[in-house]
Image (cartoon, helix red, strand yellow):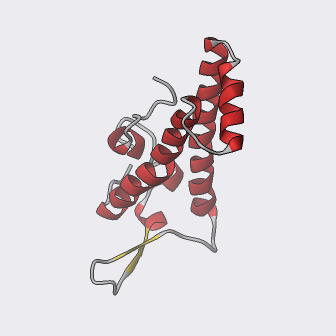
Amino acid sequence: MSGTPDLDAFGTEFTAEARDTSIRMLEVLVEGKQGSEEDRRIANLLLQMSSVEREITIHLVRRFIDTSLHNVLWMIERSDRFDLVARSEDGQEFRSLKEQSDGLSAEPYTEEGWFARHSAYGDAVVE
């Protein structure tokens, strides 16, 4: 995609804080390391699944994480009312990320997209 410094900075943070944190939470849940009663119940249900069923479930959840993030970016991209903006270092200027991008919802994808460059989990839904 266009790769402006503002887009790259947003992509780095978006990937780490939204995508990677969600995937990390999924991993912790699957490993049974979450503490709430609901998390333990879900972890126990996952343990009752075969390894193939568990793998499919993890794949689906990771797919829905990426799909949800894509849909949020797509909503902002299409909106005439909402935008994402970057503030200049001096705090005096605000720059539209939508205007800097060829397509905000496509920024995470491709070989040089945000997920490939910034995610601890790479760009694939499953390895």
Q: From the viewer's perspective, is residue 105 above or below residue 97? A: above
Residue 51 at x, y = what percent? 61, 13
Q: Residue at x 65, y 45 (%)?
A: 36
* Left or right, residue 32 beside residue 45: left
* Left or right, residue 27 beside residue 11: right
The quadrant the C terminus occupies is: top left
Quarter location, residue 52: top right
Q: Residue at x 62, y 47 (%)?
A: 68
Q: Residue at x 52, y 30 (%)?
A: 125
Q: From the viewer's perspective, is residue 44 above or below residue 92? A: above
Quarter location, residue 38: top right
Q: Residue at x 38, y 41 (%)?
A: 119
Residue 26 at x, y = what percent? 56, 37
Residue 110 at x, y = what percent? 42, 37
Front in this rendered view, residue 42 or 103 = 42
Quarter location, residue 73: bottom right
Residue 116 at x, y = what percent? 37, 38
Count of number-bearing discs: 0
